[in-house]
Amino acid sequence: MTEHDPDFRPLPMPTPESFRYEERDRVGIITLDRPDRYNALTFQVYRELTDFFTVIDRRSLDPEGARALVLQGEGKAFCSGGDVEDIITRLFERDLDGLLRFTRMTGELIHSMRRCKTPIVTSIKKVAAGAGAVMALASDLRVMGKKSFFAFLFPQVGLSGADMGASWLLPRVVGMGHASEILLLGDRVYAERCAEIGLANRVIDDSPDAGGPAAVDAAAFELAKAIAQKPHFATRMTKTMLQQEMDMGFTDAIEAEAQAQAICMQYPDFREANDAWLAKRDPNWK
């Protein structure tokens, strides 16, 4: 059974224990919920998020499902990475096989985010560090507060900057030169610099007069809402092609896009756009 079958039924929604989820205006909002720890990740959060992105992508095919996602953190920060007490200190108890099981699990989360055809907007308040930085990187769009920063800090703790797919994703977002500097040094990259190199899509005033950190979440929601109002089949196809063409040569990419566009032309939204234009009304996407 595929999403194009008339009898397709999305998977039932799970109830996560380690984070919150709600839907509003066709936008699904995923909120990391450990504000006292800057929303640091635990083993449970890794596992639940990985499974959740798979299920939520299927649910987006439901007529009432979310058409875009926001990934954010509760409180004044996005995510400070893996929790020192729950994860880091426990890694010293593992042998090589045990460590490899953990590193593969972290990579599965990033893989599930990139496989998810529903666009993801990440709201970055204060800090996106370590695994939090890679999660934000794996999203499709990033909204940052003026006072926030990325920190791919792995080299500063004796680890490779190439973690969870960072050395594959980051050069494709900011270029090899910028990616090499960021991943070799592990220094903070503040919002203004992120905007300059393309790591941030929006930089929002997060001063108290402008609404503080909540203004960043609000801007991320509005961006996701704008995506959710577009024809969903087309946005899913666009994200699919952006991901798949990363591994293609130019000739193969041109052919893949020809096939993708032909499929979209057979979908009802293409005719609906034309009918709406002729009737001078807003389109009613299927």
Image (cartoon, rainbow, N blue to C red):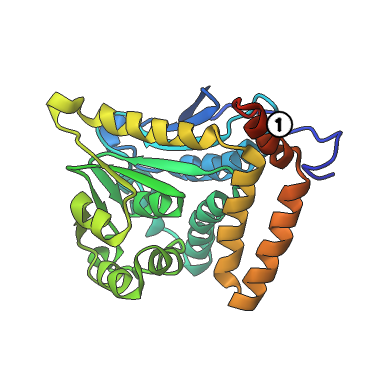
Image spot of residue 116 (x, y percent): 59, 47
Q: Quadrant of residue 164?
A: bottom left
Q: Quadrant of residue 137?
A: bottom left
Quadrant including the C terminus: top right
> Which residue is the site of mark 1?
286
Residue at image coords 30%, 31%: 35
Image spot of residue 148 (x, y percent): 21, 44
Image spot of residue 284 (x, y percent): 66, 27
Tell me if residue 232 comes above or below residue 244 in the rendering: above
Residue at image coords 42%, 50%: 135
The answer to whether residue 18 is visible is no
140 with respect to 238 (left or right):
left
As shown in the figure, which amino acid type bears the numbered disc 1? Lys
Tell me if residue 177 comes above or below residue 13 in the rendering: below
Front residue (pair 225, 108) = 225
Q: Secondary structure at mark 1?
A: loop
Front residue (pair 6, 34) = 6
Residue at image coords 79%, 32%: 9
200 with respect to 146 (left or right):
right
Q: Residues within 10 Å of mark 1 (few under 14, many from 20)?
A: few
197 with respect to 51 (left or right):
left
Front residue (pair 126, 177) = 177
97 with respect to 145 (left or right):
right
Residue at image coords 66%, 32%: 278
Tell me if residue 18 comes above or below residue 253 in the rendering: above
